[in-house]
Amino acid sequence: MLVVLLYDILLYTVARSNEVRTMKWSHVDLNSRIWTMPTSKNGRMHRVYLGDLAIKILNKARNYTDGKGYVFGSTGKISTCGIEKENLDMMCGWALSQPIRRHFDSFNIKERFYPHDLRRTGATMIAGLFGRRDFAAMALNHTNKDATDIYDQYVYDKEKNLTLDALNRAIELNY
Protein backbone atom coordinates (compact mmCIF):
# COMPACT_ATOMS: atom_id res chain seq x y z
CA MET A 1 0.00 0.00 0.00
CA LEU A 2 2.84 2.42 0.77
CA VAL A 3 4.17 2.03 -2.77
CA VAL A 4 0.81 3.15 -4.20
CA LEU A 5 0.80 6.18 -1.89
CA LEU A 6 4.37 6.94 -2.90
CA TYR A 7 3.38 6.92 -6.60
CA ASP A 8 0.66 9.46 -5.83
CA ILE A 9 3.11 11.74 -4.01
CA LEU A 10 5.49 11.56 -6.96
CA LEU A 11 2.80 13.04 -9.19
CA TYR A 12 1.39 15.55 -6.68
CA THR A 13 4.81 17.01 -5.79
CA VAL A 14 6.83 16.36 -9.00
CA ALA A 15 9.69 15.35 -6.70
CA ARG A 16 12.36 12.85 -7.69
CA SER A 17 11.66 9.26 -6.63
CA ASN A 18 14.83 9.21 -4.53
CA GLU A 19 13.70 12.38 -2.72
CA VAL A 20 10.31 10.83 -1.94
CA ARG A 21 11.81 7.50 -0.85
CA THR A 22 14.09 9.35 1.57
CA MET A 23 11.46 11.86 2.79
CA LYS A 24 11.52 12.03 6.59
CA TRP A 25 8.65 13.00 8.84
CA SER A 26 10.97 15.47 10.55
CA HIS A 27 11.15 17.39 7.24
CA VAL A 28 7.37 17.57 6.78
CA ASP A 29 5.20 20.21 8.43
CA LEU A 30 1.61 19.12 7.83
CA ASN A 31 0.20 22.25 9.49
CA SER A 32 2.15 24.60 7.23
CA ARG A 33 1.78 22.13 4.34
CA ILE A 34 5.49 22.24 3.52
CA TRP A 35 8.08 19.52 2.95
CA THR A 36 11.58 20.96 3.35
CA MET A 37 14.49 19.09 1.82
CA PRO A 38 17.66 20.31 3.56
CA THR A 39 19.59 19.53 0.37
CA SER A 40 18.53 18.31 -3.02
CA LYS A 41 20.22 17.07 -6.19
CA ASN A 42 21.41 20.59 -7.04
CA GLY A 43 22.84 21.06 -3.52
CA ARG A 44 20.26 23.62 -2.49
CA MET A 45 17.57 23.54 0.14
CA HIS A 46 14.19 22.97 -1.53
CA ARG A 47 10.69 23.50 -0.17
CA VAL A 48 7.82 21.54 -1.67
CA TYR A 49 4.35 22.91 -1.04
CA LEU A 50 1.80 20.24 -0.32
CA GLY A 51 -1.62 20.56 -1.93
CA ASP A 52 -4.80 18.95 -0.61
CA LEU A 53 -4.16 15.64 -2.40
CA ALA A 54 -0.60 15.41 -1.11
CA ILE A 55 -1.77 16.10 2.46
CA LYS A 56 -4.37 13.33 2.19
CA ILE A 57 -1.72 10.87 1.02
CA LEU A 58 0.69 11.84 3.81
CA ASN A 59 -2.02 11.39 6.42
CA LYS A 60 -2.67 7.89 5.05
CA ALA A 61 1.06 7.11 5.07
CA ARG A 62 1.29 8.17 8.70
CA ASN A 63 -1.00 5.25 9.58
CA TYR A 64 1.65 2.85 8.26
CA THR A 65 4.76 4.48 9.71
CA ASP A 66 3.40 5.98 12.94
CA GLY A 67 4.70 9.37 11.82
CA LYS A 68 8.28 8.31 12.63
CA GLY A 69 11.41 7.99 10.53
CA TYR A 70 10.89 7.87 6.80
CA VAL A 71 7.45 8.79 5.45
CA PHE A 72 7.37 5.79 3.13
CA GLY A 73 9.53 3.52 5.24
CA SER A 74 9.03 0.04 6.49
CA THR A 75 7.78 -0.59 10.00
CA GLY A 76 8.26 -4.34 10.17
CA LYS A 77 10.63 -7.15 9.31
CA ILE A 78 11.15 -7.16 5.55
CA SER A 79 13.76 -8.20 3.08
CA THR A 80 14.99 -5.21 1.17
CA CYS A 81 17.99 -4.71 -1.08
CA GLY A 82 18.82 -8.35 -0.39
CA ILE A 83 19.18 -7.78 3.37
CA GLU A 84 16.60 -8.79 5.95
CA LYS A 85 16.37 -6.25 8.76
CA GLU A 86 14.09 -5.32 11.63
CA ASN A 87 12.39 -1.93 11.40
CA LEU A 88 14.25 -0.90 8.29
CA ASP A 89 13.26 2.66 7.53
CA MET A 90 14.15 3.45 3.94
CA MET A 91 12.62 1.77 0.91
CA CYS A 92 15.07 0.55 -1.73
CA GLY A 93 14.97 2.09 -5.20
CA TRP A 94 13.86 -1.08 -6.94
CA ALA A 95 11.01 -1.48 -4.43
CA LEU A 96 9.36 1.45 -6.16
CA SER A 97 9.52 0.25 -9.77
CA GLN A 98 9.34 -3.54 -9.46
CA PRO A 99 5.76 -3.90 -8.16
CA ILE A 100 4.26 -1.97 -11.05
CA ARG A 101 6.50 -3.63 -13.64
CA ARG A 102 5.38 -7.07 -12.51
CA HIS A 103 1.72 -6.14 -12.78
CA PHE A 104 1.38 -4.07 -15.96
CA ASP A 105 -0.77 -6.80 -17.52
CA SER A 106 -2.92 -7.53 -14.46
CA PHE A 107 -3.63 -3.78 -14.08
CA ASN A 108 -4.41 -3.67 -17.82
CA ILE A 109 -1.80 -0.95 -18.35
CA LYS A 110 -1.19 -0.68 -22.07
CA GLU A 111 1.51 1.98 -22.08
CA ARG A 112 4.28 0.99 -19.71
CA PHE A 113 5.64 3.65 -17.39
CA TYR A 114 8.13 4.05 -14.59
CA PRO A 115 8.19 6.24 -11.46
CA HIS A 116 10.18 9.03 -13.13
CA ASP A 117 7.49 9.33 -15.80
CA LEU A 118 5.12 10.73 -13.14
CA ARG A 119 7.52 13.65 -12.63
CA ARG A 120 7.46 14.29 -16.37
CA THR A 121 3.66 14.09 -16.43
CA GLY A 122 3.36 16.58 -13.55
CA ALA A 123 5.82 18.98 -15.21
CA THR A 124 3.91 18.76 -18.49
CA MET A 125 0.64 19.48 -16.69
CA ILE A 126 2.18 22.51 -14.94
CA ALA A 127 3.50 23.90 -18.22
CA GLY A 128 0.07 23.40 -19.75
CA LEU A 129 -1.72 25.08 -16.83
CA PHE A 130 0.45 28.19 -16.88
CA GLY A 131 1.71 28.23 -20.45
CA ARG A 132 5.19 28.71 -19.03
CA ARG A 133 8.08 26.30 -18.65
CA ASP A 134 9.71 28.32 -15.88
CA PHE A 135 6.88 27.39 -13.48
CA ALA A 136 7.53 23.71 -14.17
CA ALA A 137 11.29 24.27 -13.69
CA MET A 138 10.69 25.92 -10.30
CA ALA A 139 8.50 23.05 -9.12
CA LEU A 140 11.06 20.52 -10.38
CA ASN A 141 13.81 22.41 -8.52
CA HIS A 142 15.87 22.83 -11.66
CA THR A 143 18.55 25.47 -11.76
CA ASN A 144 19.16 27.87 -14.58
CA LYS A 145 22.76 27.85 -15.77
CA ASP A 146 22.96 31.49 -16.79
CA ALA A 147 24.66 34.42 -15.07
CA THR A 148 21.40 35.66 -13.53
CA ASP A 149 21.11 32.47 -11.48
CA ILE A 150 24.28 33.42 -9.63
CA TYR A 151 22.81 36.78 -8.59
CA ASP A 152 19.17 35.79 -8.14
CA GLN A 153 18.91 34.23 -4.67
CA TYR A 154 15.10 34.48 -4.44
CA VAL A 155 13.66 31.04 -3.59
CA TYR A 156 10.35 31.41 -5.49
CA ASP A 157 8.31 29.91 -2.66
CA LYS A 158 5.12 31.79 -3.58
CA GLU A 159 5.37 30.64 -7.17
CA LYS A 160 6.10 27.02 -6.23
CA ASN A 161 3.14 27.04 -3.84
CA LEU A 162 0.84 28.41 -6.55
CA THR A 163 2.20 25.91 -9.08
CA LEU A 164 1.81 22.78 -6.95
CA ASP A 165 -1.59 23.89 -5.66
CA ALA A 166 -2.78 24.33 -9.26
CA LEU A 167 -1.36 20.92 -10.19
CA ASN A 168 -3.16 19.22 -7.28
CA ARG A 169 -6.44 20.96 -8.18
CA ALA A 170 -6.12 19.98 -11.85
CA ILE A 171 -5.49 16.35 -10.92
CA GLU A 172 -8.42 16.38 -8.50
CA LEU A 173 -10.75 17.81 -11.15
CA ASN A 174 -9.70 15.19 -13.71
CA TYR A 175 -10.15 12.15 -11.46
Image: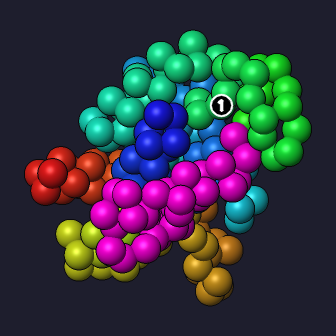
- The residue positioned 57% from the left and 70% from the top of the image is 142
The residue lying furthest to the left in this view is 173
User: What are the residue bounds of the magenta stretch?
Assistant: 91-119
Q: Nearer the viewer, residue 5 or 76?
A: 76
The residue lying furthest to the bottom in this view is 146
Query: Residue 145, located in which quarter of the rendered image?
Result: bottom right
Q: Is residue 47 above or below residue 147?
A: above
Q: Nearer the viewer, residue 113 or 62?
A: 113
Residue 44 is situated, as x and y percent measured from the top left of the image, at 69, 56
- The residue positioned 44% from the left and 43% from the top of the image is 4
- The answer to whether residue 148 shows anywhere in this view is yes
Would you name the residue on which mark 1 appears? Answer: 73
Q: Would you say residue 60 sits in the magenta stretch?
A: no
163 left or right, relative to 63: left
Q: Is residue 159 above or below residue 128?
A: above
Q: Nearer the viewer, residue 25 or 79?
A: 79
Query: Residue 52, located in which quarter of the rendered image?
Result: top left
Instruction: Look at label 1 and name its amino acid.
Output: Gly
Residue 127 is situated, as x and y percent measured from the top left of the image, at 30, 75
Q: Would you say residue 102 sits in the magenta stretch?
A: yes
- The residue positioned 58% from the left and 19% from the top of the image is 65
151 left or right, relative to 29: right
- The residue positioned 88% from the left and 38% from the top of the image is 83
